Amino acid sequence: MSTKNTQARTGQDAIALLTADHKAVKALFKQFESLSGQDDADDEKAALVAQICDEITIHAQVEEEIFYPAVREAIDDDDLMDEADVEHASAKDLIAQLEAMTPTDDHYDAKVKVLGEQIDHHVKEEQDEMFAKARKADVDVDALGALIAARKAELEGELGLDDEAPAAARGASPNGARKAPAARK
């Protein structure tokens, strides 16, 4: 597959796609933060948390399946890659807790805030260190971008997600919980 065809199909390289995900999730956390302290915002909070969890889950899965293996092979920094794996595991743990909760549960807002802080830290390391090392190692970000875009579409389809539907319409439970997409075998 040529780079030109890949660019035409995805319109972006892998790093651009992942960076766009980072920005989108950061915006969702800001929306959640704006609801903090509002007693009548439980439905909005649940919908936002469902969306945050879906976005992070899909993002982490495509990184783990596609981007990280390619970068790990290309760069000589196992510590950086291992740390990214551990950060993903930590985020997944908080996501599982949030998916089992409702906005009225104790520590709900605190867990969302901590998840946001962990994601901010993780994103900073990816964007400041990993992405630069991937580019320097000449990782084929165009080919990876095509793979990531295709896999994201597949995972979004499994979850019944589309850009137009709010969480409730996407089949989220009243507390915003949703099953994680199936891992690729």
Image: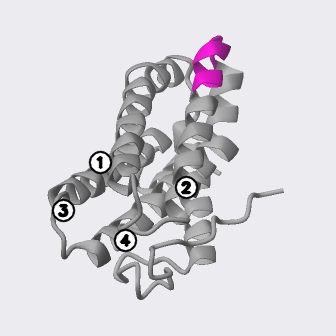
Mark 3–mark 4 distance (CA, rounded to whole Å): 11 Å
**Magenta extent:** 75-83
Mark 4–mark 1 distance (CA, rounded to whole Å): 17 Å
Residue position for label 1: 26
Mark 1–mark 2 distance (CA, rounded to whole Å): 20 Å
> Which numbered disc flags the more N-terminal residue, 2 or 4?
4
Residue position for label 3: 35
Percent across and percent down for residue 160 are 55, 81
Answer above or below: position of 58 versus 13.
Answer: below
- Asked if residue 52 lies in the magenta stretch, the reply is no
In front: label 1 or label 2: 2
Residue position for label 2: 97
| Residue in front for this viewpoint, 164 or 97 | 97
> Which numbered disc flags the more N-terminal residue, 1 or 2?
1
Residue at point 15% right, 66% down?
38
Label 4: how many Cα within 10 Å (few below 14, some 14–19, many 20+): many
Mark 2–mark 3 distance (CA, rounded to whole Å): 20 Å
Residue position for label 4: 46
Label 1: how many Cα within 10 Å (few below 14, some 14–19, many 20+): some
Quadrant into which the C terminus falls: bottom right
Mark identifier at residue 67: none
